Image (cartoon, rainbow, N blue to C red):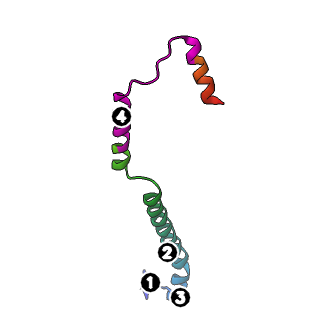
Amino acid sequence: MKAKGQVIDENMLIDRLLPKIEERIRADVIRSLISALEEQLYPSEDNFREEFVKRVEKAGKSRGKIFRTKKELETHLKSMVE
């Protein structure tokens, strides 16, 4: 093989390129694995949005907890921390 008047040893060229090719393939495989795991572990954005909307609608229908005094509110907040 000749390039610009120089003889290039094919084996030397392969030895130089092979590590770069392997690294790119390794990076692509790792990205694909991470992507596949994320799809299995985390809900899709559409499912997450639907669940969020359902929770908000449910919260909007409930009366919630009503505190008559500031002390009742403080007591409730402290009980949540403990």
Dot 3 falls on a residue whose secondary structure is helix
Among the two numbered marks 4 and 1 on one chain, the one whose residue lies closer to the N terminus: 1
Q: Which mark is residue 11?
A: 3
For label 1, the crowd category at 10 Å Cα-Cα, with few meaning under 14, some 14 to 19 and many 20 or more, is few
Residue farthest along the right direction in this orientation = 82
Among the two numbered marks 3 and 4 on one chain, the one whose residue lies closer to the N terminus: 3
> Is label 3 or label 2 in front?
2
Residue 80 is left or right of residue 6, and the answer is right
Q: Which mark is residue 58?
A: 4
> Residue at coordinates 61% horizontally, 19% vertically from top-left?
75
Among the two numbered marks 4 and 2 on one chain, the one whose residue lies closer to the N terminus: 2
Which residue, given by chain and number where applicable, does mark 2 sit on?
21
> Is label 1 or label 2 in front?
2
Image quadrant occupied by the N terminus: bottom left
Residue 28 among those drawn in magenta: no
Q: Amino acid at mark 3?
A: Asn
Residue 65 among those drawn in magenta: yes
Q: Amino acid at mark 4?
A: Lys
Which residue, given by chain and number where applicable, does mark 1 sit on?
5
- The residues bearing labels 3 and 1 have C-alpha atoms spaced at a distance of 18 Å
> Is label 4 or label 1 in front?
4
Q: Amino acid at mark 2?
A: Ile
- The location of residue 29, given as percent across then percent down, is 48, 70
Among the two numbered marks 3 and 2 on one chain, the one whose residue lies closer to the N terminus: 3
The magenta span reads 51-73
Image quadrant occupied by the C terminus: top right
Depth check: give the residue in front, 9 or 65.
65
- The location of residue 47, given as percent across then percent down, is 35, 49
